[in-house]
Amino acid sequence: MAQQDSKDLATGGFLSFSLMAQVIIATMFAFYSFRLGEMGLATFYLAIAGILIVGLGVFYIFDQHRLARLILASTLIVGFFYLLLGASDPTSLMWCLTAVPVLVGAFDHHQSLWMLIVLFAASTYVLSGSSSLISTPDYSEIIVVRFLSSYAILAAFAVAMDNSRFDSLAKYRDLSSRVDEIAQQDILTQLPNRHNMEGRLAVKYQQYRLENQPFSILLADLDNFKFINDRYGHDVGDEVLFAVGQMLREPLRDEDIVSRWGGNEFMILLPTANAEAAVNIAERLRTKATEIEMQAQGDRLRISLSVGVASINKCTGIDDLMSTAENGLYQAKHMGRDMVVVG
């Protein structure tokens, strides 16, 4: 879906440019034909310009890109065959070539490719004089060869440039998506980061105000983490943080969300849990933490969590919810660590 959106956005910009460019080109050809005394061709080019001006109005006033694209394509294709079959002036074939890059840029790869193939096959058939049913202008062989070869070369370059353009767009979108992902994710633990969780909490609080469905949060802090970092090094500390982050995710429900809140703190959002259920979940997580087996420099690391619990139905808002969880965590630390306290 995202790739299609980028295609629509890019072809939309090219579509407006093509409509305006074709109006200018058709007007110039009309003026040239008028100077030569070809009033029929001058009228034809002015009609082309008028129809494309209508297409511009459809594009800008009514914002109907699909209809504007249809007007552009049908006008160019009809004009292409009209000049191919009814004009004896070789200069008119130059106008036919202007349709090639426009059709490529204004439509997706498959559509434009099929249109180019059909137009080239029809042009070859008509200009070669293979059919006695179709009366064509008596173009010289060199003009036919020049036109068909110019068409083929222009079509090849247009398709190649179009593919390159949209490959670049796809890479740009992938890079943008990756940047957005990094902005919302903690690199070390691969968990949602604080910014991500704050957004989720805000959304959940709005749902709570509308539906009155309680939710709870857990604020878990890794005990004695400074000691681990100081004694065994930051690499070991990072491994412990990653292991705890993965452990916190395993026993939870699909709807529960674990994030790295900052430093050695983790925030767990329990979207449908009341205070009692939140405490039970917190105790289960605290127990699981003590079961993590890790060693560093021959020592078995003792890992434990202190957890503060807060439920929204006992708080007055998000700020109060956070303060309550922080208070519970502070009490758990003050009372000896490795415990769960309801704030």
Image: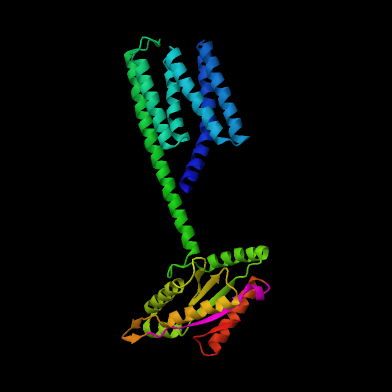
- The image's colour scheme reads rainbow
Q: Is residue 143 visible?
A: no
Total marks placed: 0
Q: Residue at x 41, y 15 (%)?
A: 90
Q: Work out whether 48 lies above or below 249.
A: above
Q: Is residue 48 magenta?
A: no
How far across and down, in percent of the image, does residue 29 sit? 50, 20
How far across and down, in percent of the image, does residue 214 sit? 62, 70
- Quadrant position of residue 241: bottom left
Q: Is residue 66 visible?
A: yes
Q: Is residue 312 magenta?
A: yes
Q: Work out whether 320 lies above or below 61.
A: below
How far across and down, in percent of the image, does residue 168 sit? 41, 46
Give the residues in magenta: 301-316
Q: Residue at x 52, y 68 (%)?
A: 256
Is 317 on the left or on the right of 296, as rendered? right
Q: Residue at x 57, y 86 (%)?
A: 331
Q: Work out whether 26 lies above or below 268.
A: above
Q: Work out whether 188 lies above or below 158.
A: below
User: 3 or 257, which lies in front?
Assistant: 257
How far across and down, in percent of the image, does residue 205 sit? 63, 66
For the C terminus, the quadrant is bottom right
Is 343 on the left or on the right of 100, as rendered? right
Q: Residue at x 40, y 75 (%)?
A: 243
